[in-house]
Image (cartoon, grey):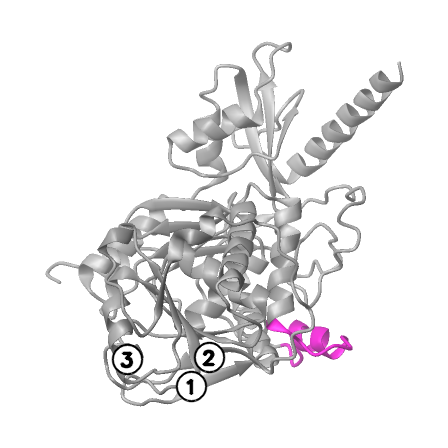
Amino acid sequence: MTDFNIDQYEITVTLDDNTNKDDDKGTIKPKLYPDLSDLNEKEEDDKTIESTEYTVVLKTNSSSTSESETLTESTNETPNLRKWLLNNLSYHRKNNPAKIALIEEVSEVRCVTYEELVDGSKRTANYMSHHGVNMGDKIMMCMENTVEYVFYQLGAFLLGAIPVLINPSHIASGKLKDIGCSTVIVDFEHYGHVLRISQNTLRSIQRVFVLAEDIAAISLARHVWIIDGFGYLSFSPIHKMDDDSNNSTCFILPGSLETDQYISHSHQSGFQLCHDYFNKLFKMLSNAESIGSQNHLITDGLHCQDALSYLFIILTRGETCVLAESTLDVWRASLLDRIAGIIEQYKVSSEMMESILSQHKLIHDVAVMQSDQHVWCGVLLKNENETPTSDSLEKLLKKHHIPIAINKVIVLDFIPRTEKGKIIRNEMPFIMNFEKEFSEQEEISESYI
């Protein structure tokens, strides 16, 4: 800790600047139950939203009635975490499949898009169902932060099963109570502890899914059925969610390491934990400069209810979550350096993207804008007969370790700048939308000729 000064780091988070813009139809907001009936119809014209970088500064919330409370009161149905989460994920899977949902920064860097996230969850649901996991079953989950953790938890929600999220430090403490978990999902590091407690303490366990890279290194046991946790990869991503789940319990968390008590959340309390709490928290953040992405970092274990609810609210908003390794020693100097490094790595500004994209051989000048959770790129061409593709721009960004999808490339006549050369960003939405509509009308006219 010698000479370590935490003041040298500026911790920032990002979110949509939708204050006083409740009528903006282009802003994708978390909903109780999104209207998904018109997803196959023609999408409405894209509305422009601004993305803002926020420095964490808390302010007093003067509103006596929160937006989330009003939303809940105006809805006839009881809030349901399972439906709210899965319906929003389906929405983003349909409308923005190439958007990065998860970035795992643990052993190696892995990126998962919303398409891969939803399909992977459906594969795990089919895989668990194939091995006898049914609606209402309790599934104990014990592992470090990985994308598979999220896959299996969402897969359990799809089946209508109940995830029981165990602290990896808890499983060897001898303080776990048998609450009827028939299935365990565990990584290789904690597999040995699961075999021990399943024989001595948790006798209800029947099957264990083990996530091990080297399947030959798994020790087989006689008292439980051992299953390869990565076997879901060969299963179909087509799964029909059962809406008839009448389980009053949504998910279960353990208490402190000193007790064998559990904390049970209903669908309503789980929703309030995720939606209401973080909506109030986001309203307490003050406005700063605009940027071009929303990335969030989780360094706590996903078995913790605050980290878990934070993950869910990120995914329902269609944003990106960076999963880092979890540790009990959260204030270790080396870990703080690690966190600061990750924040700096994934703090992607519009200016940074524009600087990189301007290196493209076909681009003379470029401006980046975000519209309805999509990234638009306006370009001035060196040769009007040669237009860069979104794939070529994405590859250029990936070379600089920026995994952002370019959803639309629009050829512009000019890019408005100040006398000092800065892009006038409040004029870009009008210019981008005008050029987009003009090019679409030309395409329609050409199709009739």
Q: Residue furthest left?
A: 2
Return the residue at label 2. Answer: 252
Q: Is residue 159 above or below residue 10?
A: below
Would you say the residues marked 2 and 1 are in contact, meaning their CB atoms lie under 8 Å apart? yes
Choose the circle earlier in sequence order: 1 or 3.
1
Return the residue at label 3. Answer: 199
Q: How many marks?
A: 3
Q: Viewed as shown, does residue 100 lie left or right of 376?
A: left
Depth check: give the residue in front, 363 or 116. 116
Badge 3 element: helix
Q: Position of residue 275 (x, y in %)?
A: 58, 70
User: Which residue is found at the position 38% from the left and 45% from the top?
Assistant: 110
Depth check: give the residue in front, 36 or 63. 36
Q: Position of residue 111 (x, y in %)?
A: 43, 45
Callout 3: 10 Å neighbours few (<14), some, many (20+)? some
Return the residue at label 1. Answer: 179
Q: Position of residue 300 (x, y in %)?
A: 34, 66
Q: Is residue 104 above or below residue 78?
A: above
Image quadrant containing the N terminus: bottom left
Q: Is residue 61 above or below residue 299?
A: below
Image quadrant containing the C terminus: top right
> Which segment did they paint magenta?
63-81
Depth check: give the residue in front, 402 or 99. 99
Callout 1: 10 Å neighbours few (<14), some, many (20+)? some
User: Which residue is found at the position 23% from the left and 59% from the top?
Assistant: 335
Instruction: Give amino acid for label 1.
Output: Ile
In space, the residues marked 2 and 1 are separated at their CA atoms by 10 Å
